[in-house]
Amino acid sequence: MKKHNFSAGPCILPKDVMQKASEAVIELDGIGLSLIEISHRSKEFVAIMEKARSLALELLGLEGKGYSALYLQGGASLQFLMVAYNFLENKAGYINTGTWSSKAIKEAKLLGDVLEVASSKDKNFNYIPRGYVVPNDLDYLHLTSNNTIFGTQIKEFPDTKVPLICDMSSDIFSRQMDFSRFDLIYAGAQKNMGPAGTTLVVVKDEILGDVSRKIPSMLDYQVHLSKDSMFNTPAVFAVYVSMLTLQWLKDLGGIAAIEEINEKKASLIYSEIDLNPLFNGFAKKEDRSSMNATFTLTDESLKDTFDEMWKEAGINGLNGHRSVGGYRASMYNALPLDSVGVLVDVMSDLERRG
């Protein structure tokens, strides 16, 4: 039976990407060797890495604009620390919109002063703060564009005079925007790009090298750039699958094409949440994420029935995070619209049974 994968991550990937990746594990492009047994210094993998880096910049509209792309390890969690190591000299600003923002703040505090410019913690992170003032004396302002756990998403980014850094782990490549407004973007691959194991970092070259501290080699963006993203052995399989996924997105029509599809998916699920009296949306309507729809039952006595229904329909990964409870439908780029339709049908059927 076909599974409809709403997992928050690692998550669904395009079927043809999975097919090509599985073939490469057996043998890469007819070379007589598996992808995962060739040298990362081989001409075959060097070409893969170069294409993966180039596709990222091309899709974000940053090619030829003074940006570089890296594929690193350690997930977004290591980026929380790397960002501070490379850019925090005196004081940094953070917008706290959830669990991952809080973790980023914790790591930055190890290296300098941190100003929490705004926070939505007072309402369990169910909204995006607005109306805050960004001081001009910050080394940088850090934001999290999409909050996987709470189902909120920043729709408008602040205009600042300080460098803008953004964790885009759960909505990278999902919607159009002017990415040149950001000085550094990072994203774990396991949402919209590939399997867990690699992290995309896109950085404006000119902002590097200004801190006075000595940076450990593995945490220094300049070191990784000097070695073309292969200072240490990269996550070969994860980079390869990310390259395939980015090529899939390009062939589809790029971010503009996938944004249109994502908007249809989000509209479908949120319409049902709002119209069906058995469900409540968690996030404020104006801040709802197009990637992660969070919702709860209005009558918890229906939980066992609803859980049985969606599981029988072949739905996977719908349980919400413990911080919110209820349910979370993660609708990343590769999730088909018809999968959302199946979930909506189950929700409607629950109402009809009542």
Image (tube, rainbow, N blue to C red):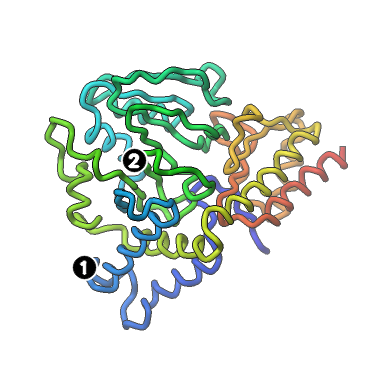
Identify the residue at horizontal 45%, vertical 28% (top origin). Answer: 158
308 in relation to 230, above or below: above
Q: Say which quarter of the image contains residue 206.
A: top left
In this rendering, position of residue 330 left or right of residue 220? right
| Residue 45: percent from left, percent from top | 29, 69
Which image quarter is the C terminus in?
top right
* Residue 1 marker: none
Q: What secondary structure is marked by label 2? A: strand
Q: Which is nearer the eye, 265 or 28?
A: 265
Amino acid on which disc 1 is placed: Arg
Identify the residue at horizontal 40%, vertical 26% (top origin). Answer: 102
The residue that disc 1 covers is 41
Instruction: Characterize the local packing of mark 2: few (<14), some (14-19) or many (20 or more) Cα atoms within 10 angstroms.
Output: many
Q: Which is nearer the eye, 5 or 183?
A: 183
| Residue 194: percent from left, percent from top | 44, 57
50 in relation to 10, above or below: below
Which image quarter is the N terminus in?
bottom right
Q: How many marks?
A: 2
In this rendering, position of residue 148 left or right of residue 283? left
Q: Which is nearer the eye, 269 or 35?
A: 269
Identify the residue at horizontal 39%, vertical 27% (top origin). Answer: 160
The residue that disc 2 covers is 184
Distance between the Cα atoms at labels 2 and 1?
27 Å
Q: Which is nearer the eye, 276 or 178?
A: 178
| Residue 257: percent from left, percent from top | 58, 56
Amino acid on which disc 2 is placed: Leu
Sequence order check: which comes first, mark 2 or mark 1? 1
